[in-house]
């Protein structure tokens, strides 16, 4: 069985994108959230990436 990337329904702060990515890669969601914050404030690309992921990623079944 293979893993699919979903937005998390249980551990979400805004839309579940970071928690879903963390579940997929078996990481702590805080690490992914901090990475997105660094991308937003450091490069400005994190916000765009987050919104794209929020639109494209399906909800966890």
Image (cartoon, rainbow, N blue to C red):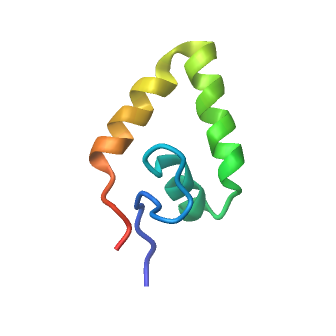
Task: Identify the residue shown where x is 70% and y is 47%.
Answer: 30
User: Quarter of the image holding residue 7?
Assistant: bottom left
**Which residue is outermost to the bottom?**
1
* Residue 18 position in % (x across, y down): 54, 47
Q: Quadrant of the N terminus?
A: bottom left
The vertical placement of 48 against 33, above or below, is above
User: Quarter of the image holding residue 31?
Assistant: top right
The vertical placement of 35 against 42, above or below, is below
Q: Quadrant of the C terminus?
A: bottom left
Task: Identify the residue shown where x is 55% and y is 54%.
Answer: 19
The vertical placement of 3 against 36, above or below, is below
Task: Identify the residue shown where x is 65% and y is 64%.
Answer: 26
* Residue 56 position in % (x across, y down): 28, 47
- How many numbered circles are shown? 0
- Left or right of 39, for residue 17: left
**Residue situated in front as seen by the camera: 32 or 10:** 10
The vertical placement of 6 against 39, above or below, is below
* Residue 36 position in % (x across, y down): 59, 32
Task: Identify the residue shown where x is 63% and y is 14%.
Answer: 42
């Amino acid at each position: 069985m293979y893993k699919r990337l979903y937005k998390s329904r249980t551990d979400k702060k805004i839309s579940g994108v970071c928690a879903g990515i963390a579940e997929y890669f078996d990481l702590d969601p805080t690490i992914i959230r901090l990475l997105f914050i660094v991308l937003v404030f450091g490069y400005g690309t994190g916000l765009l990436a987050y919104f794209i992921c929020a639109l494209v990623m399906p909800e966890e079944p």
